[in-house]
Image (cartoon, grey):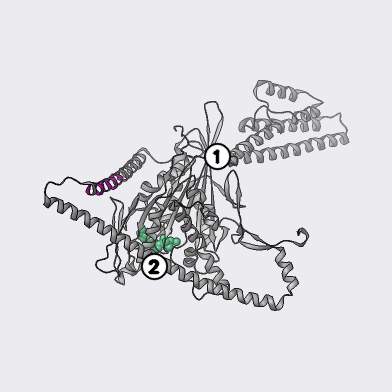
Amino acid sequence: MPKLKPSTSAECVKVVVRCRPLDEKEIRDGHERIVDMDVNKGTITIHNPKGSNSEPPRNFTFDAVYDWNSKQRDLYDETFRDLVQSVIEGFNGTIFAYGQTGTGKTFTMQGPKNDPELRGVIPNSFDHIFQHIARTQNQQYLIRASYLEIYQEEIRDLLAKDHTKRLELKERPDTGVYVKDLSSFVTKSGKEIEHVMNVGNQNRAVGATDMNEHSSRSHAIFIITIECSTEDDEGENHIRVGRLNLVDLAGSERQSKTGATGTRLKEATKINLSLSALCNVISALVDGKSTHIPYRDAKLTRLLQDSLGGNAKTVMVANIGPASYNYDESLSTLRYANRAKSIKNKPKINEDPKDALLREFQEEIARLKAHLQKKGGPKKGKGGKKKRRHRETADGEIISESDDESDEEGEEGGGGDDEEVYMKEQQEKLEKQKEAILSNQSMLQVEKDRLLNEVHDREEKLNKEKQARDALAVKIKAMESKLLVGGKNIVDHTNEQQRALEQRRREISDQKKREREIQQKLEEREEKAVEMEEGFQSLQQEVEIKTKKLKKLFAKLQATKQEIADIQEEHSKERQELEQTQMELTRDLKLKMLIIENFIPPEEKVKLQNRARYNEDEDQWDLIPLANKR
Ligand code: ADP
Ligand code: MG
C-alpha cells in the first residue's frame, strides 16, 4: 500500500438524497408522486401539491440523488465505498441517514434481513472491510464494534448485558469525547461482526412497546473501529486507527407536543432535542458568522462533533418519501440537506494514538510468550537435547536433576512439536523411574513406596505444568487470531473473475460520478454565460437574450420569495410549539412552587437550595452530600 500523507485540506460534507418508491398503500390510495429526479445531474425537483399554478417547483442539486429504482449496491459503490476506505486508512468517518420516519433510513443503513441483494450500508461495509484485510499483506488489523442508542437524551449500550443502563459521555483532551464503559467486541470476520449487529438490533427492540415508535424517536449508532499496524523500513510498528460511525437518526418529523403534561411533557421536550441540536449545529456551521457552535446542547452532537466541522469525513443521506402528503416534511429535509452541503471538515489520519487496542494486544502477546518460555520447556538446538538424554541415562540422582530442569529457561516460546516431544520425554522418564524402583530387589518396601509417591507427585506436577502451558498457549493463539493478517488467518475466497467484475463495477461508478460532476459544472457555466452575454448582433437578439435573462432572474426571485415564505411559516410553527411548551412548563412549575411553599419550611428550602448544583453533563440538579458542603 502506498504511504499516505496526512491530509489537512478541507472538504465538504457529502450530501446525497434518496427517494423511496411509492408503497402499495400509497398506490392503492391513489397518492401522487410529487418528486422528480435527474440522477445523471444529481438534481431533484419537488412540486407543491397545494400550491397555485404559478408557484414554481423547488429545485435542488446534490452530490448525487437516488430515485426509486436505485440499487443498494450502487449507493455503496458510488457514495459510501470511498468513505469506508478512508476509515480503513485511518480517518474517522460518519454516515448519517436523515429524514422523516418511513422514508427508508433503516432500509438504507441496514436493509431488510435475509436478502443479500438488499444489504444496506452497514453490512456492505463489513464485506468491504474484511475483504480488504484479506487482500492485504504485511499488516495487522484489529476490528471491533460497538452499538449504542440515544433515546430521550440517554445513552444505552445495545451490546451490554444490561442495555437499559444509561451511559455517560466523558471528554479527554487527547482523544476527545467518548462514551464511558461502552462495550466493544473484537470481531474476526464479516460473519462475526454481523452477529454483533444482529444482537444489538434485537436488544433495541426489547422493551419497546412499539418498535416503530421507538426507532422513530431514537438514534442508533453502530461504531466500527479499525486499527492497522504497519512495520516501517526500520522495523518499527506504526498504528493507524479509523473510526466509522453509522448513524440511523430519529425521524425528522415535527413531534406534536400539544396535550402532553408532566412526565410525558418532559419526555416530549427531550425526544427531539438531539435532532434539533443537530439542526442548530448545522445552521451555526454554515452561517459563517457564528462563533459558537452548540455541540454541547445534546448527546448526539457531542458524540459526533468530529463529524460536523471536525476532522472526520462525513456523508449525509437525506431520505424522503415521494408522495404528495409528505410534501412539507420532504421539503424541510431537502432544505436541511442543502445546508449541510456547505459544512467543511478537515479530515486527518489518526496516527499512533495512545489508546490503540492493537498495541495493547501486541504487548500482551509478547508478555504471554515470554511467560510461557519462563515456565520452562525444551531447550532448542542439539545442546539441550543432548543434556536431557544425558540426564536420562544417569541413575540414582534422577530426582534432583529433573527438579532442576523445571527451573530452566527455554530459549524460545512454546513451539508445538518440540513441546510435545519434551513432555513425552519427561513422561517416559518418569515411567522408567517407576519401573526401576519396582524392579529394584535390594530396596525396602517402605522405601519403594516413598519413592513411588515422589514419582507420582512429580507426574502430577508435570501434568499441571502441561495444563498451564496449554492454557497459556491457547490464550496466545486466541489473541493472535484476533489480529488479522491477510492470507494468514483471513483469506479472500473470491476468484479472479469475481474480482475483475468488482473492479469493473467500481470503475463504472467512478465514471458515473465524474460524469455527474461534469454535468453540474457545465450547467453552472451555462448559467453564467447567459448572464454575461454582452455583445448583441441585432435588436431582436438583444430582446431575446434579455428576455431569457429576465425570465431566469424572475424565476430566481420567485423561488427566493417562496423560500422566505416557507421559512417564515416554519418559524411561526416552531414558535407556536415553543410557546405552547413554555405555557405548560410554567403551569407545571407553578404547581411545584405551590407544593414547596405549603409543605416545606422556608429554612429547609434555603438549605436545599444551597446544596443544589447543576450538573452540565447530566443536565440535572444534584444535591451535594452534606459532609462535603463548603
Ligand atoms: P425509516 O427507517 O426511515 O423509518 P424504513 O427504512 O423502515 O424507514 O422504510 C420504510 C418502508 O419503506 C420499509 O418497508 C422499507 O422496506 C421501504 N423502503 C424504504 N426505502 C426503500 C427503497 N429504496 N426501495 C424499496 N423499499 C423501500
Ligand atoms: Mg428506521
The residue lying at 69 percent from left, 40 percent from top is 467
Q: Earlier in the sequence, mark 2 or mark 1?
A: 1
Quarter of image, ligand 2: bottom left
Figure quadrant of residue 457: top right
Which numbered tag is attached to residue 569?
A: 2
Figure quadrant of residue 339: bottom left
- Residue 433 against residue 134 in the figure, above or below: above
Q: CA distance from mark 2 to mark 1?
A: 56 Å
Residue 280 shows in the view: yes
Residue 183 x, y percent position in the rendering: 59, 52
Residue 115 x, y percent position in the rendering: 40, 56
The residue lying at 33 percent from left, 54 percent from top is 66
Q: Residue furthest front?
A: 539
Q: Nearer the viewer, residue 406 or 530?
A: 530
Q: Amino acid at mark 2?
A: Glu
The residue lying at 69 percent from left, 35 percent from top is 371
Residue 361 x, y percent position in the rendering: 60, 39
Q: Nearer the viewer, residue 553 or 314?
A: 553
Magenta stretch prevailing secondary structure: helix
- Residue 330 against residue 525 in the figure, above or below: below
Query: Mark 2 or 1, which is nearer the eye?
Result: 2
Relative to 89, 26 lies left or right: left
Q: Amino acid at mark 1?
A: Leu
Q: Which residue is mark 1?
A: 483
Q: Please say whether residue 333 is one of the residues in the magenta stretch.
A: no
Stretch in magenta: 517-530
Relative to 629, 525 lies left or right: left
